[in-house]
Image: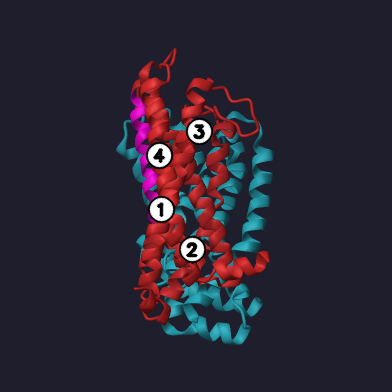
Amino acid sequence: MISAFIHKFSSPKSFVQITKTLYPLFIFTGLSMLIIGWTWGLLFAPPDAVQGNSYRIIFLHVPAVIFAELIYFFMALCALMHIVWRVRLAAYLIKSAAPIGAMITFIGLFSGSIWGIPTWGTWWQWDARITSTLILFIMYLGILTLHGSFSNLEKSDRLMSILVVIGVVNIPIIKKSVDWWSTLHQPASISVSGGSSIDPSMLYPLIISVIGLGFTLISLGILTSRSYILGREKNKKWVLDHV
Amino acid sequence: MLRLIKIESSKLFYKLKSWLGPMLIMILVLTAFPLSIDISQFDLEKFYFSIIVVSLLMTSFLATEGMFEEDFEDGSLEQEFLIEQDFYKVVLSKIFVYVCFIGVPIALIGAIFSVANGVAIESFVSVFLSLSLSNLLLFNLFAFGNALSINKGAMLGVLTSLPLALPVIILLGTAIRSIQYGNGFLEIISLMIGMGFLISAIMPLIISTALKTHID
């Protein structure tokens, strides 16, 4: 049953059909949670004892950097599927997710720089976490450039997938950089396994913001991938019927 | 395999730009750097390594630039594929030849210059070993970048392989610090040797997949 589901869902046609119904649900959930999380975080959460109100950028910065890494991880899984099983949809998803990943990584870096000015006294520091995140941003740009360099799109898909799989080595480096090197960037304050060092009055709006941004990015991903799939498969009968 | 190494060696010998160019640039940068600053104000011994590391990165990229391009353009890559039925051995021998004839001399130049600029003579072997192993890793990674971009220019090669090369630079930096402080060198060099073996075994496989995609 699971393999039948995967087989069905891995066809671009099914993806376009299924996501058509899922998109309104995701965008509504995402935007509502983002509004709740950001309103709570920006207006009602108490100021930080040390940083005052400047810490409030955390509600944008943390979700952005979490998804900068998660999107790449998702792309790596898709790349593996494309290399091993030659799933066309997986390549389409990588191509659609890469600009979103680049954008969210840039937002993460930019918001971090803004936060750095009042807290560290500098907007940039060549420390392990920041540098490895910059590498991730360059990686996204490299993937997009590589894909755009060849006129044969099937070849582009395959080369892009190889690069994405190799580049995944950067993700654990980013994650563990604050533990492996002595960095200006603080270690993680939130832990999935418990023991978060952040106060619940700030943690809850942060979690809501993370989930909200997640759903919003999925919706954005659905939009971009749908339009990309329709463009790539424009000569197929199902696309002509769909349009 | 020996046949491939012989072919690649003779090919590289005639490509003067590929092997002599990076070495000359390495010498030029390492010579020009102390001249461009007031050495009486800086402790050259401490930060001369940084310029060696950056030169190493630059020259190893220059050395591998167009590693597959000429063979791809003149059809010899395709011919080798038909003879060997795979690219693994071709890529492995190509990287081996490049590391031996360009990577090791560059590392030697770096080690000689570091000693000439105040680094203790006892550290010569450690510096040479660290630079050689870094070159082995960098040549593999840049070969990967070049295999992806093949005939699409150096810019794409940099964009695709530089992010992967930076962890190697971090590792080399750690090795150099351990040489300077005199502890933990063995652990770092063992890690680099391990990584060198791993990458040398895996990377040709990945590069051959990329090259096959171009041939298809």
Residue B158 percent coordinates (x, y): 40, 57
The quadrant the N terminus of chain A occupies is bottom right
Q: Which mark is residue A18?
A: 2
Classed neighbour count for the residue bearing mark 4: other residues with Cα under 10 Å, few (<14), some (14–19), many (≥20): some
* Observer-nearest of A193 and B133: A193
Decide: few, some or many residues near mark 2? Use Cα within 10 Å; few <14, some 14-19, many ≥20: few
- Which of label 3 and label 1 is nearer to you? 1
Q: Secondary structure at mark 4?
A: helix
Crowding around mark 1 (Cα neighbors within 10 Å: few <14, some 14 to 19, many 20+) is: few
Label 1 marks a residue whose chain is A
- Up the image or down, B62 lies above or below A7; here it is above
Position of residue B165 in the picture relative to residue B93 (left or right)? left
Q: Could you tell me which secondary element the residue under label 2 belongs to?
A: helix
Determine if the magenta segment contains residue A112: yes
Chain with colour red in the figure: A
Q: Residue at (46%, 29%) from the top-left corner?
A: A205
Q: Which residue does the numbered mark 1 point to in the structure image? A: A24
Helix, strand or loop: magenta stretch: helix
Mark closer to the chain start, 4 or 1: 1
Q: Quarter of the image for the C terminus of chain A: give it.
A: bottom left
Amino acid type of the residue that numbered disc 4 sits on in the rendered structure? Ser
Residue B104, position as x, y percentages in the image: 55, 57
Q: Where does residue B189 sit, x and y in percent of width and height? A: 65, 44
Disc on the earlier residue, 1 or 2? 2
